[in-house]
Amino acid sequence: MRKTAVLISVLVFMSCGKSAVKKPANLIPENQMVEILFDVILINSAKGVNKQLLQNKIENPLNYIYRTHGIDSLQFTESNTYYTYHTDQYNTIYEKVESKLDIEKAAYEAIIDAQKRIKDSIKKSRKNKIDTTKIAREKIKPIKKSLLPSSKFDSLRK
């Protein structure tokens, strides 16, 4: 009885091991997988920000990604399963996706900062707008009465 229990537990442990995932015939290359996963992450983020706007622009986001990259859902699923099993490759893919996201984030932050600087400078220029009539009045000095021609003095005398 004891031998049977040991034999069954050994078989159970052996059956729990990972089964090898075969490389699919139409495996998506790593670089294209980076682009696809980048697009998937962007679309999922867009759903979180403004789902209605996304639905107005793109009817079915996943089909849009498949069409854009020239793949189908089965090819993506098989490739994703393969890369998931091969964790070193999958980690490399996700590191590339993360760095690409960081680059895009930095580019958009630079655009936002530039727009903010422009807006602030416009606000500042409006605030510091110079009243030219006030300056003109301050620059004109009152004329001394002694320099004015007297009424007794007629410059047109003959």
Image (spheres, rainbow, N blue to C red):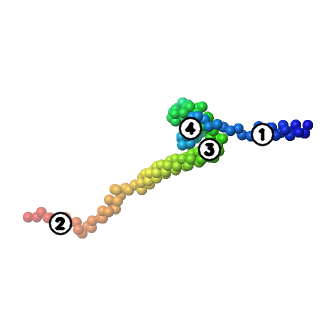
Residue farthest toward the bottom in the current orientation of the protein:
146
Closer to us: mark 1 or mark 4?
1
Query: What's the CA distance linking mark 3 and mark 1?
Result: 26 Å
Question: Which quadrant holds the N terminus?
Answer: top right
Tell me which corner region of the image, top left, top right, bottom left or bottom right, holds residue 12: top right
From the viewer's perspective, is residue 115 above or below residue 80?
below
Instruction: Count residues near mark 2 (Cα–Cα under 10 Å), then give few for <14, some for 14-19, many for 20+.
Output: few
Q: Earlier in the sequence, mark 4 or mark 2?
A: 4
**Residue bearing the label numbered 3:** 90
Circle 2 — which element? loop
**Residue bearing the label numbered 4:** 28
Q: Are marks 3 and 2 in contact (CB under 8 Å)?
A: no
Q: Is residue 71 left or right of residue 11?
A: left
Query: What's the CA distance linking mark 1 and mark 4?
Result: 31 Å
Identify which amino acid the numbered label 2 is placed on.
Lys
- The numbered mark at residue 14 is 1
Q: Is residue 10 left or right of residue 107?
A: right
